[in-house]
Image (tube, rainbow, N blue to C red):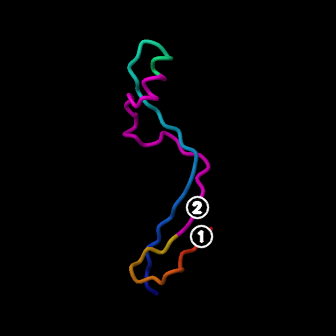
């Protein structure tokens, strides 16, 4: 049997942290909303909750159209 390559797409709730330099919490929120923040953890989430598979696709070049399996 030939091994195939599949792409699995998931969705979840994720927690991110950002650093913002400001004098007050209000200013920090405003700067964050304007994009003036630096993500912690290299931009990756610090935690992921309830990850669920959305779909699984065969991505081999030779697979037939319509062969995708959605959950």
Q: Which residues are magenta?
A: 29-56
Q: Are marks 1 and 2 in contact (CB under 8 Å)?
A: yes
Please give the name of the residue rendered at 47% of the width and 42% of the height, measured from the top-left corner: 45
Q: Which mark is residue 3?
A: none
Q: Which residue is mark 1?
A: 70
Gap in Å between the C-alphas at discs 1 and 2? 7 Å
Residue found at the very far bottom of the displayed protein: 1
State which quadrant residue 23 falls in. top left
Residue occupying the point 46% across, 29% down = 33
Q: Earlier in the sequence, mark 1 or mark 2?
A: 2
Label 2 SS: strand
64 is higher (above) or lower (below) than 56: below
Q: Residue at x 37, y 39 (%)?
A: 42
**Residue 40 highlighted magenta (yes or no):** yes
- Residue 50 located left or right of residue 29: right
Q: Position of residue 67 (x, y in %)?
A: 53, 80
Which labelled disc corresponds to residue 54? Answer: 2
């Amino acid at each position: 049997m030939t091994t195939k390559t599949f792409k699995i797409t998931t969705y979840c709730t994720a927690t991110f942290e950002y650093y913002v330099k400001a004098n007050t919490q209000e200013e920090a929120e405003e700067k964050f909303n304007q994009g003036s923040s630096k993500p912690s953890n290299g931009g990756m989430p610090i935690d992921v909750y309830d990850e669920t598979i959305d779909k699984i696709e065969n991505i081999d070049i030779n697979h037939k159209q319509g062969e995708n399996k959605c959950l």
